[in-house]
Image: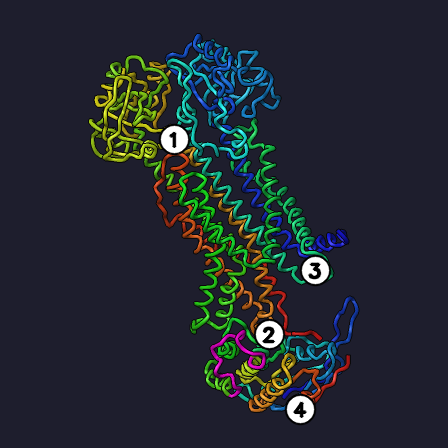
Amino acid sequence: MPAIGLLIRHQLRYLARTPAATAAQVFGTALGVASLVAVHLVSERIKAELDANAPREVTHLLRGAALDEDAYFELRARWRSGQFPDVEAMVPVVEGHAWTAGRPRRLSGMDLLADRRPGETDTNVDGGGDGDAITDLLTRDAVLAGAALGFERGDVIRLNDFEVSVVGTFGTTADGFLADIATARRILGRDGPTAVWLRTGADDPVLERWLPGSTAGFRQAGALHLGEGLVARPLAEAEPTRRFALALLFNLGALGLLALFVSTFLIYQSAHANVTRRAASDAQLAALGVSRGTLRTLFVGEGTLLGLAGAGLGVCAGWALAVVLMPAPTPSSNGVSLSAVAIAKGGIGGISVAAFGALAASRQSAKPNLRLAWAAGAAVLLLASVASDTLAASFGIVLALCLLQVAVLVPGTGTFLARLLARGQRRIAITRRAAMRSATGQLAEVHVAVGALSVAVAAAIGIGVMVESFRQDFVGMLEQRLWDGIQVETTATLPGVPASLDDLRASPGVVDVRAYARAPVTINGLSANVLLTRGDIAEARRYGYGAPFQDAILLNEAGARTLAAGPGDAVRVAGGRGARMMRVVHVFRDYGVPGPRIVAAVDHVQPILEGIAYDSFSVRTGEGRATAPLKADLEARFPTAEIRDQSEIRRRALDVFDRTFLIASQLTLIALLVAVAGLYNALSELQARRRGENRLLYTLGVGRGRIASLAMQQNALIGLAAAVLGIPLGLAIAWVLCTEVNPRAFGWSIPWTPGLANVLPPVSLGVAAALLAGLGPTWVAARTVTGAAQHEA
Amino acid sequence: MLRVEGVGLRRDDGGRSRQILDDVFLELAPGQVAAVWGPSGSGKTTLLNLLGGLLRPDRGAIRLTVTTGPDAGLELPVHALPDRERLRYRRRHVGFVFQFLNLLPTLTVEENVLLPLELNALEDRADAALRRLDALGVGSVRHRFPDALSGGEQQRVAIARALAHAPALVLADEPTGNLDAGNAERVADCLWEQARDAGAALVVATHNERLAERADTVIRLRE
């Protein structure tokens, strides 16, 4: 390429001579990358905490009465002989409660060698920095302590009658212990494993590494039948709270993508402004014989260079943001660490979007009708997405709506407002009339930046409405479902229940005691679970139903969706001793439970079941009643059971919810900041175009202050237009997330409940963002305006 | 009455100080026309900017005495006015006609003409200002936007706007520079006639010798 050195020098000098525009492009890219990296790191961290009690990428959990040491060794032998080709790893686990400092704590012991090499460290474990925590666990009587317990490396504690060393901590909210299986067996006094963790190739670890939480939205793997009485359940089914948290991560990931989407527009707008500013010099170069291809290559090269700078800054900023959002659980432990995947994701995302933005902008300048092509593409995508019922299609709807907003609605509104303001408005001052018409007329020209602001506002509204809708319904469900009191649950049968519970009913402060049993059934041929209850009005109200259901069943939302059944329908429920048609009277929300589940009265279902084994019971206490003594009593009576305070469960569930969505508000701010940077370029361009008009006004006696005021009014009008246009899009995004994305991903819908509190702040922020973005261009416009010398002497 | 006494201006030009104007004298009574003639780069527009209060001279004095209207008898030392007063001087006492970008594109013809009246709170003169549009032959396009007008029509609207607020001084910078000969003649006729009728002193910068010859006084500038 001839004279390429000269051309590159020209390019670099241009960047140096327009520092504000260059900085805006780098800053915008950095913000977009920062949001992407921050979401990734926070998701990685939350997922690591969720995985803290399980080895990496566990997909199935095998539990049950048939699982003893002989059964496990036979199973392992069959696996090693190749009988279960789908199973990649098999880890025996011993679980139970061990007493320390007068309280029982959950202890999980796993065969550390079954899934990792000796000496290999676990990134979830904080072993004080020397990396040998796992080796310690294998060679000494040692445990890892949940970070919430407050122990530190080097502490020596007693678990039951054994003295053990704490060699590290894990999680941030975990309050149990992890140990090697041999240590745990000694402490718990057990022979065989109580569970086996399995990993299959069903989940995609690569995708999960790049988009933490994303696979939670995919169809979950089914149960694995490994032999008589040995059915490994998908982890999602066995641990619904984990799945629920992953669902939150999944939604969060979607929000992170929206922030990147907004920054894509910004980068495009910056690149487009660059193309426009350089039109004259590019025309000169073209006249001198430089080909369009060479100019485009230079432009894309420049975009890539700025993208590289922005991505570097963005990765650092994203890491800093994640550290602020997810502080280290203890002063001695590590907080968020910058992973290679996060760096690669931010780098690739920032550079490719910047390069693509530059390429698209240079092509757009050559083909102004590209906007129509984008609009047509978005319309096709919308139609195709609406016609499909896949998860990808529901995201397609959001993408198409955003594209239509930018390509059609914003410029169309500009044209409409320009026509509306073209006549009349005699009550508005003429100078203001001119400014308003100028702003609306040019809205179509800077539609990408205004559209980006509009999408940012919409994202903020959509996120706010979705999170608030989710929270309202979730809180409502927790209030209904979790009575004040204690929940006792075990993986096996609770001995003597329900007969042994009679004395509990007479305990002071106890209002009611209810025993529950679970049993596997099929509904219309599909594998499901039934929860056996009394079926009275009190039980009905826990599921949002207002009448006893002694001769009918309640079906969860995932089941209703899968079975296409609703209230009034009859379904065929089959157990070990037969089958019968049962009438569905109510469909209830069941966040966290991926598959079909029914709630029925014991007497109604008992005839088709081989037997009933009660595995949980709840003790309802009076409101505000202290539950600690009762809990301690139950812990002594049922040492192997999980005993939880219902209000503690409620608090923890909301804590997971709020911590996960804490980043949502920061994300919306980032999206708006990204839009500010984009809008800065667009408004600079607008004010540059208005230079002639400003000059004329100044000559006619309009002062700089008034010119600045008019410019700010223009910015406010543009911001208001973007923000107002963001309202319907935001509500639509929330609606799609609540009623399409979540049902398709998890089987549950979220009631779409928009409120002014979720709409007004983003709209105000949108207008404020436009005013903020316009400060610089306005100052420049007012400062640099000079007299009307049309051709200086 | 406009008096220009020994006005001079130097400007930095690429690190070198250059004398743009030197010892310019002019005395112009209301209704009279002065032409500033010279080749490109001779300082015609700079002189207009000095008269309009957009630039301040290094030396000499510019004084405008208002002879009609509520400010009759007011003498303004344009060269010495503070910034805020110069802005007011420009708004109230000067009308401008340019070669290009005379009119605000987002205002209709009528709104462009009413703009100086609104800026000076003289809305009561709106009828007279709009009648001038008829007199200039552009009354029928008063509701159109500038981009729908021909170059000649735009210049006539600009003349109407320049005179709308009855200024004491009208400054025209190459007002016929982008018009063909026929249109240029007609626009010049309109400008001369309307300025005289309004009792305004008119200063026209031009490199068109024929136009300059029509003036009462000619200031010839050399490069």
Residue that protrudes farthest toward the right in the picture: B16
Instruction: Give the magenta range.
Output: B135-153
Name the residue carrying label 2: B101
Front residue of A404/A687: it is: A404
Question: What amino acid is at disc 4?
Answer: Arg
Gap between marks 2 and 3 measured at Cα: 29 Å
Badge count: 4
Q: Quadrant of residue A492?
A: top left
In the image: residue B204, left or right of residue A412: right
Q: Are marks 4 and 1 on the same chain?
A: no
Residue A550's spot in the image, x, y percent? 20, 26
Give the numbered dot on residue A592.
Answer: 1
Question: What amino acid is at disc 1?
Answer: Gly
Figure check: A729 above or below A72? below
- Which of the image's four quarters has the N terminus of chain B? bottom right
Gap between marks 3 and 4 measured at Cα: 46 Å
Q: Which is closer to the viewer, label 2 or label 3?
A: 3
Label 4: how many residues lie within 10 Å, few (<14), some (14-19) or many (20+)?
A: some
Name the residue carrying label 3: A286
Gap between marks 4 and 2 measured at Cα: 25 Å
Label 2: how many residues lie within 10 Å, few (<14), some (14-19) or many (20+)?
A: some
Name the residue carrying label 4: B214
Chain of residue at mark 3 = A
Residue A268's spot in the image, x, y percent? 58, 52
Front residue of A373/A430: it is: A373
Question: What amino acid is at disc 2?
Answer: Leu
Residue A118's spot in the image, x, y percent? 59, 16
